Amino acid sequence: MARLSAQELLWKLEKGKPIPAILLLGEEPYLRDACRTQLIERFVTEASRTWAVSRYSAERDETQAAFEQAQTFPMLSPQQVVFLEDVQAIEKLGEKHRDEAVAQVGAYLEDPAPFTVLVLEATGLDQRMKLGKLLAEKTLVVDCGLGEKVEERLASATALARVMAKEEDVEFEKGAAEDLAEFVAADLMRLKTEIGKLATYAGERKLIRRQDVRAMVISEKTTTVWELADMLASRQPKKALEFLDRLLRDGEEPLPMLGAMTWMYRKLIEASELKGVANGWQAARTLGMRPEQAELALQNARKISRQRLLGGLRAFQKADDRLKRGGEDARAVMEFLVTELTAPETQAAPR
């Protein structure tokens, strides 16, 4: 079947034609999430979603269970949506089990249940193997990637940034969307988060300027805040202060850096509250992050107590007040903050 973009899938859904099987192919979690939301909203009423939306993973050996559900008439709903994630895991099975799984997929696609929309998800598939060829032929393939080349990824992210900005009732000054896409390295999850912050910052102006992006967004090109998270979690003040010094020398501004650190701690708190989650792929959707970032959040959340995380948020607030008040050396404020966050419990500053 044809290969569509995530936006083209929305147009196709609006035409109301039945789609028995869809393959979401690509590693961009934001686009996959957008497609999932569109499909659920189109085919299952909100009141029925507890019974008529189900999720399975080929990586957890749930392929057979997914097809059994797809062939079972849903409760309290005329249609259901069945998701089978991590389909690329089938390619890694031993030959016998792989062939059995591919045969199972093929048998279902030859005679799909009319009351089910089956959604297969894969970050990538080898088109030379039976599974890739089968799904390319028998499903509606939706491209959930931004492209292989840096230029393609940035162009796609820039276009999506403008769409996201409209949803926030703001628009970009010429060049600002391109700057933002480059700053976040075309990470769509982070792009959406930053646009929300920038929209609030822009206020009644309703315009995001290039200077706003430079002032409020910490550059992904320079570093990632998760490197600092590990230093803070394991209490390495020397390394953390050296890291901070490099950021400041590279031109990062203290206020957006502080905003990124605050966001990081909030994500660590969210990660610490997740139950039954073993890896970043499982946590990515809930946390609104890339899988590799979600994995780091899970790891570091295990190293920092909730008390320390909450204390860190209070320390960020005090540092934010000091920076915005002015009159103090910004570097000294940030150095004091990092020292406080890496101090042993007995030496931590009183709250």
Image: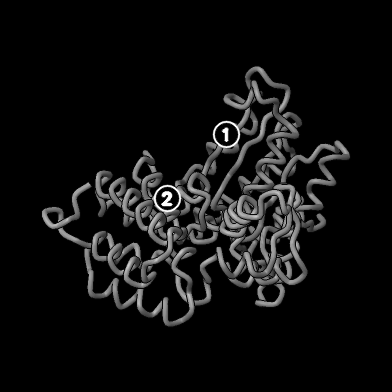
Quadrant occupied by the N terminus: bottom right
Q: Classify residue 339 as left or right of residue 257.
A: left
Under circle 2, the secondary element is helix
The answer to which of marks 2 and 1 sits earlier in the sequence is: 1
Q: Quadrant of residue 214?
A: bottom right
Looking at the image, which residue is at 66% across and 71% down?
Answer: 179
Q: Quadrant of residue 161?
A: bottom right
Q: Is residue 134 above or below residue 108?
A: below
Question: What kind of residue is marked 2?
Answer: Lys
User: Where in the figure is residue 113, as x and y percent of width and height?
Assistant: 72, 33
* In the foreground, 22 or 293: 293
Q: Label for residue 54?
A: 1
Looking at the image, which residue is at 69% across and 65% down?
Answer: 209
Residue at image mark 2: 267
CA distance separating discs 2 and 1: 26 Å
User: Where in the figure is residue 266, as x and y percent of width and height?
Assistant: 41, 48
User: Where in the figure is residue 83, as x and y percent of width and height?
Assistant: 60, 41
Under circle 1, the secondary element is strand
Q: Quadrant of residue 340?
A: bottom left
Q: Label for residue 344?
A: none
Q: Is residue 47 above or below residue 103?
A: above
